[in-house]
Amino acid sequence: MANKNMNLTEQQIADNWQSLIQRISDNFTSNRQDKLLKLYNDLSEQMMLAPASGIEHFHNCFPGGYIDHVLRVMDCTERLYVQWEEMGADISGYTKEELMFCALNHDLGKVGDTDNEYYVPNPSEWHRKNQGKIYDPNPNIQHMTVPHRSIWLLSNYNIQFSKNEMIGILTHDGVYDSANDAYLKPWGKEKALWNNLPIILHHADHMASRIEYENWKSGNSIEKALIKKPKASFKQPTISTQNSTAQDMFKDLFGEA
């Protein structure tokens, strides 16, 4: 299970990373497994410390929050898949590997690209304290939606994905994203989803995000989630901005370089 405690330590971050790598080995095989491991290891420095959102009252807005969220979504996805099958849902239109591929990579675009993090510390103390905006989108990264960047990263590493997987990743935010209306609000039956993979994935993501929000609401604030400077085995990611205030915020989060 993903770590339910938002106060992540260095060891918990390291354990979460190892758990994620193990799940790639457990759920995927041969060439695709190798390419996924290549992508994840190449981006490991920025991925291990990435938050899952930029605003504290959203979900997992703290160092290590991204991987903690992905693990929780994979947990929820597996359980919902079993429940849907037990309740009589038709799961013949896709494979479990396709579903888990989507769960693993649904938010991959939040890691950034091959050169830059997606989130950088918000340099405005007022916004951090009064609005909970702990991170900003990196101004040095090409704008894309998160799902589109996820697809781009997979393509950049020549990782093949099926139509089911592409639609699942693109629509995982469900009706909260109007860009999904063409898939989720069809006018004609010929345009309806061919299977329930996107629905299960969205439910799993929504469940995980809600649990993470409730953890935050119960008192696990961003201050408690801050970690000390990583040990030598943890290479500190480089913030891709020259803004000195943002650099100071980074030092507050992770310590001196």
Image: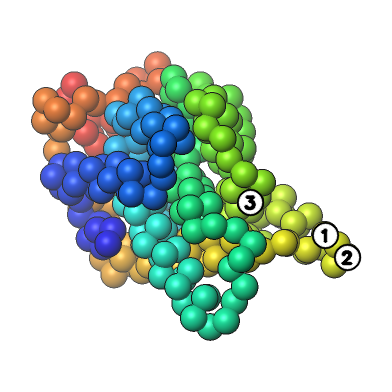
Q: Which residue is mark 3?
A: 164
Q: Relative to residue 13, is residue 45 depicted above or below?
A: above
Q: Amino acid at mark 1?
A: Lys
Q: Which residue is mark 2?
A: 188
**Residue at position x 41%, y 42% in the image:** 29
**Residue at position x 37%, y 62% in the image:** 75
Q: Report the Cα–Cα distance between label 3 and label 2.
A: 20 Å
Q: Say what secondary structure mark 1 lies in.
A: helix
Q: Which residue is mark 1?
A: 191
Q: Say what secondary structure mark 2 lies in.
A: loop
**Residue at position x 18%, y 29% in the image:** 234
Q: Badge 3 local density, few (<14 within 10 Å), some, or many (20+)?
A: many
Can residue 149 be seen from the camera position used here? no
Q: Quadrant of the C terminus?
A: top left
Where residue 232 sits in the image (x, y, percent)? 11, 25
For discs 3 and 2, the disc positioned in front in the rendered view: 3
Asked whether the beta carbons under mark 3 and mark 1 sit within 8 Å of each other, the answer is no
Question: Which quadrant of the figure has residue 196?
Answer: bottom right
